[in-house]
Image (cartoon, helix red, strand yellow):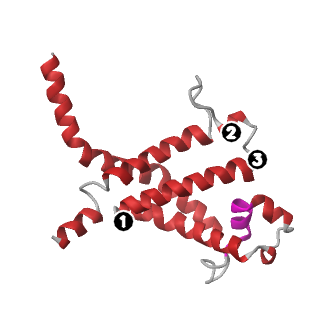
Amino acid sequence: MIAIYDTVARRLTALAPAVLPTLARFVFAAVLLVYFWNSALLKIGPGPLGFVQPSVGAYAQIWPRAFEAAGYDTAAMSWFQWAVTVAGMWAEFLLPLLLMLGLLSRLAALGMAGFVAVQSLTDLYGHGGIGQPATLGAWFDRLPDGVILDQRAFWVLGLMVVAILGAGPLSLDRLLARARR
């Protein structure tokens, strides 16, 4: 029985570098790709310059307290706040796309994990999640109903699989690596 277990374990270990990153990218695309792209679409401002002139909702989502203090006037926001808002909008389009394609995957996964961290901090501090246990979540409790920490820990886990192991065999990264050889 132990010999069978060891044989199965060795085979699974050998498959892990190919299966885990491919599966992590697939699950990310299946579960979060549309979520992030829809969020990014809401941030595009009106007209052809919408990719560099974010919507009012973009500032409200990313800088809720500062935007309220500015009287919901986009012109009152600083250059830095504009740059962060535009970068966040572009990141919500580009990083998930790179992950889905398996292109620059490790960098995209690290960038996406950083994005999720900033997103979570904004939700907790900017939108008032601190002090509300049902919103914040609690690790090692008996309930899996926490929204932010519990859920986003799983998001980052999948991203770290890609950051550490790479994109897997079904990726543009692998295709480009073969072409360089």
Q: Magenta segment: does it hold 55? A: yes
State the quadrant of the C terminus: bottom left
Q: Are marks 1 and 3 in contact (CB under 8 Å)?
A: no
Q: Mark 2 points at which residue?
A: 135
Q: Where is residue 154 in the image (x, y as percent from the top left)?
A: 49, 41
Give the distance between the C-alpha atoms of the residues marked 1 and 2, in whole angstroms: 33 Å
Q: Residue furthest top?
A: 1
Q: Which of 97 and 11 is in front in this view?
A: 11
Amino acid carrying mark 1 in the image: Leu
Q: Nearer the viewer, residue 96 or 78?
A: 78
Camera-near label (1 vs 2) is 1
Residue at the image position 49 percent from the left and 52 percent from the top? 32
Residue at the image position 43 percent from the left and 64 percent from the top? 97
Amino acid carrying mark 3 in the image: Gly
- 95 is higher (above) or lower (below) than 23: below
State the quadrant of the N terminus: top left
Label 2: how many Cα within 10 Å (few below 14, some 14–19, many 20+): some
Q: Where is residue 47 in the image (x, y as percent from the top left)?
A: 65, 82
Q: Are marks 2 and 3 in contact (CB under 8 Å)?
A: no
N-term mark: 2 or 3: 3
Q: Which mark is residue 128?
A: 3
Q: Mark 1 points at which residue?
A: 104
Give the distance between the C-alpha atoms of the residues marked 2 and 3, in whole angstroms: 9 Å
N-term mark: 1 or 2: 1
Residue at the image position 31 percent from the left and 45 percent from the top? 20
Res. 159 in view: yes
- What is the span of residues highlighted in magenta in the rendered image? 54-63
Q: In the visual, does 88 lie left or right of 25?
A: right
Q: Residue 173 carries which label?
A: none
